[in-house]
């Protein structure tokens, strides 16, 4: 189906009558056209999040309303538009989503119209779960992993051990939800899923940078930690090693579908000996006999 449908035009006209330009822009960004939301509509919405007189809850409600549509195209585009605003909009947008009790309830979504509907419904269910997890992580941390400062004096590198041990599992859960999108080049067949994939790829780069910073911080503090903390830290580090493989698989797909190689970070595998020395240290703290 190409072009705006009569339903799209009626929905946009309804909002024009009620005087809500923001809701009209949401409708325009989530039409039945099989293409990514138009840049001009997304830019209008991003700008709207910066305006103090714009009602953010109302904007979010219109997006949730569109995500309740029967068509996979409208729902997927509503998710893409929401993700775009979570990343590029004023922080009060993601703040508001994090404060809500319910977000997207699409775990059973299924559009049975045509084979595309079936295939895309799977990705809609996974994508909505990731966006829920992204908002939940903000609620847990009171910041967005994607927006915080990275590097030597960044948030994850300077965090105290207690905060770090609480924050890393939240970050891991968000990364897991992203990797569970589990897409392959053959699935990237239209502008809507491609737009979602690009947003996920950009999120993953930022999340991985935070993850790496957190692990460096964890390793620097490991030998000064108490026994209980060492145990938790070791589990976090082991999970990090298994995630590394899955992150590199996701990045390979990005390369296969033509994302610029310069935008894809090189992942360096940590040496096995490092894990062994951490385990030895924990065993020593637990009073276990360690083999020479």
Image (cartoon, rainbow, N blue to C red):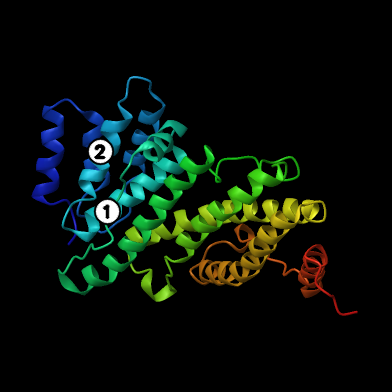
Residue 156 seen in the figure: no
| Kind of element beneath mark 2 | helix
Viewer-proximal residue, 52 or 291? 291
**Left or right for 268, reference 202:** right
Q: Residues within 10 Å of mark 2 (few under 14, many from 20)?
A: few
Image coordinates for residue 116, horizontal then vertical, percent? 24, 70
Residue nearer the viewer, 247 or 47: 247
Residue at horizontal 38%, vertical 68%? 188
Q: Residue at x 54, y 41 (%)?
A: 141
Dot 1: few (<14), some (14–19), or many (≥20) neighbours within 10 Å?
some
Q: Which mark is residue 115?
A: none
- Residue 60, x across and y down, in percent: 30, 38
Residue at coordinates 52% horizontally, 37% vertically from top-left?
142
Q: Residue furthest top?
A: 53
Quadrant location of the N terminus?
bottom left
Q: Secondary structure at mark 1?
A: loop
Relative placement, left or right, of 23 versus 171 is left
Q: Residue furthest bottom?
A: 291
- Up the image or down, 279 lies above or below 63; here it is below
The relative height of residue 244 versus residue 50 in the rendered view (above or below) is below
Quarter of the C terminus within the rendering:
bottom right
**Disc 2: which residue:** 61
* First-in-chain label (1 vs 2): 2
Asked if the residue under mark 2 is in contact with the one under mark 1, i.e. CB atoms within 8 Å, the reply is no
Query: Whole-percent x and y of residue 231?
Result: 69, 61
Please provide percent x and percent y for residue 176. 50, 62
Q: Which mark is residue 105?
A: 1
Residue 163 at least partly seen: yes
Query: Spatial distance from mark 1 to mark 2, Cα to Cα?
Result: 13 Å
Q: In the displayed image of the protein, which residue is found farthest to the front?
A: 287
């Amino acid at each position: 189906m190409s072009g705006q449908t009569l339903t799209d035009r009626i929905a946009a006209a309804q909002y024009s009558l009620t005087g809500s330009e923001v809701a009209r822009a949401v409708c325009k960004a989530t039409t039945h056209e099989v293409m990514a939301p138009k840049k001009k509509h997304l830019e209008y919405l991003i700008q709207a999040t910066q305006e103090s007189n714009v009602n953010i809850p109302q904007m979010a409600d219109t997006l949730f309303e569109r995500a309740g549509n029967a068509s996979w195209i409208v729902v997927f585009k509503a998710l893409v538009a929401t993700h775009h605003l979570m990343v590029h909009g004023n922080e009060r947008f993601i703040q508001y989503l994090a404060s809500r009790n319910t977000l997207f309830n699409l775990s059973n979504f299924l559009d049975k119209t045509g084979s595309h509907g079936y295939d895309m419904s799977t990705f809609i269910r996974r994508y909505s779960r990731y966006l829920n997890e992204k908002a939940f992580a903000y609620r847990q941390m009171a910041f967005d992993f994607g927006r915080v400062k990275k590097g030597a004096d960044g948030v994850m590198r300077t965090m105290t051990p207690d905060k770090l041990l609480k924050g890393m599992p939240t970050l891991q859960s968000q990364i897991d939800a992203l990797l569970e999108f589990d897409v392959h080049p053959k699935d990237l067949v239209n502008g809507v899923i491609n737009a979602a994939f690009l947003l996920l790829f950009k999120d993953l780069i930022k999340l991985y940078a935070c993850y790496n910073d957190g692990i460096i911080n964890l390793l620097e503090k490991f030998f000064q930690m108490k026994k209980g903390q060492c145990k938790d830290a070791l589990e976090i580090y082991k999970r990090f090693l298994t995630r590394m493989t899955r992150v590199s698989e996701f990045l390979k797909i990005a390369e296969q579908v033509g994302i610029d190689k310069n935008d894809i970070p090189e992942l360096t595998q940590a040496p096995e000996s490092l894990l062994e020395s951490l385990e030895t240290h924990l065993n020593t703290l637990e009073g276990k006999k360690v083999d020479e």
